[in-house]
Image (cartoon, rainbow, N blue to C red):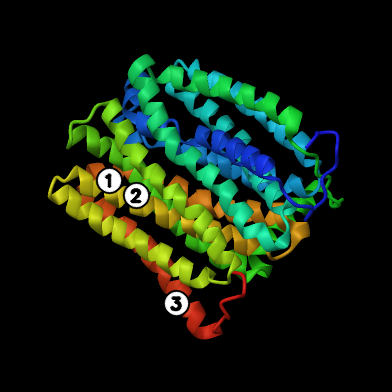
Amino acid sequence: MPHRNIAHPGSGLSAALTLLFAVATGAMVGTLYYAQPLLGPIARDLHMAPRLAGLLVTVTQLGYVIGLLFIVPLGDRVENRRLVLGLLIAVTAALALTALAQNAAWFLVAAILVGTASCAVQILVPMAASLATPARRGEVVGNVMAGLLLGILLARPAASVIAYIAGWRAVFAIAAALMAALLLLLLRFLPRIQPTGTMPYPALIGSMLRLYATEPVLRRRALYQCAAFGTFSLFWTAVPLLLAHDFHLNQLGIALFALVGAAGAASAPIAGRLADRGHSQIGTAASLGSIIIAFALSALAVAWHNLILLAAAGILLDIGVQANNVLGQRAIYSLAPTLRARLNGAYMAAFFVGGATGSALGSQLLLDHGWPGIALAGMIAPACALTSLTIHLIQARVPRQQPG
């Protein structure tokens, strides 16, 4: 679709444009995860203590939360294409600064900027949902999220392979070049969406925060995915350290291990179709249950020193987390089209608060309590979310067709 045209909500999304949204979101979200498998090399090069290594990932995710809270709501007021392109310029510059970092403070500041500007992802996803016809919204969101999730899952192995060949700085230099290329692509093909909102910026931010009080579906979905993504970050922050220390894998071996987790992205389109057919509650229970089982399997895998079983646990974890996220986004996008950017920002802020917490705890829990501590924490969080879902269903007896 030529960029000079204004796209109208519900007008439909072509297969080619859906693919563009999926590729763009996947490429951009990957910037949040490149440091995750490189904690050891970066920390050594920048002279950081092992216990603080998790901060290299945590600060990026906290920057993302800042973007979600203070930039994404502008998607309900500012022309979306212009907002996305501006953020892409910023993330390209921030990645270049990360590649040039000479000390830990420099890296951490640059990482916060990377995370903040990468919130463009959460403007693109609601854009795709807005353009989709209502009957296909879950399917479109699922397909775009599959691209996004592949970006999350492939970022770690790609970073490990590049670091193995050329060092960790090359990872961020290549990422900056990739963002520059994506900027040119979106400049040509990304459609314009002009929101109708005129609310002043302070009121816009305040209204987003008030959504937690006024939208029970948002509260529930934010809780479920905060718990789910917290365990995801916990696992993928701790497992590279475990693989290097207990399984004696180098960066290439860690990359191959992380690559198997990409199979979890296949659950996103399936979850979207389930949501379109009114099976969100069953799908949510199954996804949270799979996360609990995944951490139980991981505990057995480490106890038996079985790398294949540990990889299977990683795949099952990714399937559960990604499916739960698609179901959650489908539910909140059905609430109020005029609030879609703010709803998404509020939802994703809770999502990444969980992720930042998991990243911060990963290396410390592993050092203090070994993998049993990681596995126990990973089972408790989704078990609490599953309990909350069960109580809600018993009390409200929500029909399967109701969003959330």
Which quadrant: the N terminus? Answer: top right
Q: Which mark is residue 390?
A: 3
User: Would you say the residues marked 1 and 3 are in contact, meaning their CB atoms lie under 8 Å apart?
Assistant: no
389, above or below 346, in the image: below
Q: Which mark is residue 122?
A: none
Q: Which residue is mark 1?
A: 311
Q: Is residue 33 visible?
A: yes
94, above or below 354, in the image: above
Q: Which residue is mark 2?
A: 315
Residue type at mark 3 is Thr
96, above or below 302, in the image: above
Which quadrant: the C terminus? Answer: bottom right
Q: CA distance from mark 1 to mark 3?
A: 30 Å
User: Would you say the residues marked 2 and 1 are in contact, meaning their CB atoms lie under 8 Å apart?
Assistant: yes
Residue closest to the eye, 126 or 205: 126
Question: How many numbered dots are placed on residues in this image?
Answer: 3
Residue type at mark 1 is Ala
User: Would you say the residues marked 2 and 3 are in contact, meaning their CB atoms lie under 8 Å apart?
Assistant: no
Q: Secondary structure at mark 1?
A: helix
At horizontal 64% and vertical 41% (from top left) the residue drawn is 21
Q: Position of residue 177 (x, y in %)?
A: 57, 19
